[in-house]
């Protein structure tokens, strides 16, 4: 899978607007300030294909990217408090509406900041993915902020806190340093190929 061949495809503000799923999709979900846009840009060898905002919670749409003939789906960040209740409700409907559709889910990357324990919303997302039997991986972001020892400790603690099944892939990444990005590309390629 050639991650260099990436382009923005479309953005949708409601789940009803989403087109039918015609090819494998790799979805990215996580808290508003988890570094999703930075990770996507790093994966796709781009500086600002996915818009990185100084204000967490700016992604209020579901954004689709074409990556070598497959779809990368950037879901709105969840859990950012400085947004109107009505907007939070719309985001929730958008995310749930997406997952409730009959789509070709190749892999869902559940992004969690490695520096912190998983939030209630992180737990909720992972529980949902487990119950829905969707293929998912936990992607730990911002690893450059911790030493290698701290990374290993947090990786184990987060895995335990989320009660992850033994075979759940966990990838430790840093968009700033590029750590773990190649591992994530390999994992995505593997899951996409299995769903072709």
Image: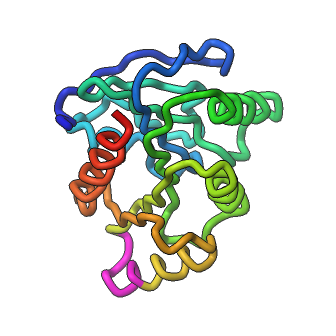
Q: Position of residue 149 (x, y in %)?
A: 35, 87
Q: Does the segment drawn in magenta span residue 89? A: no
Magenta span dominant secondary structure: helix
Viewer-proximal residue among 134 and 14? 134
The colouring scheme, among rainbow, by chain, secondary structure or one colour, is: rainbow
Q: Quadrant of the C terminus?
A: top left
Q: Quadrant of residue 147?
A: bottom left
- Give the answer, above or below, for where 130 lies relative to 86: below
Relative placement, left or right, of 171 versus 90 is left
- Give the answer, above or below, for where 6 lies relative to 132: above
Q: Quadrant of residue 86?
A: top right
Please give the name of the residue rendered at 42% of the width and 60% of the height, measured from the top-left corner.
Answer: 141
Looking at the rendered structure, the number of numbered marks drawn on it comes to 0
Please give the name of the residue rendered at 42% of the width and 38% of the height, measured from the top-left corner.
Answer: 26
Q: Position of residue 91 (x, y in %)?
A: 69, 32
Query: What residue occupies the far right of the structure in this picture?
Result: 85
Q: Position of residue 151 (x, y in %)?
A: 39, 78
- Give the answer, above or below, for where 129 lies relative to 49: below
Relative placement, left or right, of 138 versus 160 is left
Q: Quadrant of the N terminus?
A: top left
Please give the name of the residue rendered at 21% of the width and 55% of the height, measured from the top-left corner.
Answer: 182
Relative placement, left or right, of 178 versus 152 is left
- Give the answer, above or below, for where 11 lies relative to 115: above
Range covered by the magenta-colored residues? 145-152
Q: Quadrant of residue 178?
A: bottom left
Viewer-proximal residue among 178 and 164? 164
Please give the name of the residue rendered at 39% of the width and 62% of the height, measured from the top-left corner.
Answer: 142
């Amino acid at each position: 899978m050639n991650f260099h061949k990436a382009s923005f495809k479309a953005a949708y503000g409601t789940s009803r607007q989403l087109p039918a799923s015609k090819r494998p999709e790799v979805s990215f979900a996580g808290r508003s300030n988890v570094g999703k846009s930075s990770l996507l840009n790093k994966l796709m060898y781009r500086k600002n294909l996915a818009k990185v905002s100084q204000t967490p919670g700016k992604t209020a749409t579901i954004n689709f990217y074409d990556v070598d003939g497959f779809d990368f789906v950037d879901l709105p960040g969840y859990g950012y408090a400085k947004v109107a209740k009505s907007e939070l409700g719309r985001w929730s409907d958008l995310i749930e509406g997406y997952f409730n559709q009959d789509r070709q889910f190749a892999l869902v990357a559940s992004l969690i900041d490695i520096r912190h324990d998983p939030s209630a919303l992180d737990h909720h997302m992972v529980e949902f993915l487990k119950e829905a039997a969707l293929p998912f991986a936990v992607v730990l972001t911002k690893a450059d902020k911790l030493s290698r020892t701290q990374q290993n400790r947090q990786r184990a603690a987060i895995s335990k806190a989320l009660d992850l099944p033994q075979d759940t892939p966990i990838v430790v990444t840093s968009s700033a340093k590029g750590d773990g990005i190649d591992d994530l590309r390999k994992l995505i390629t593997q899951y996409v190929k299995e769903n072709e």
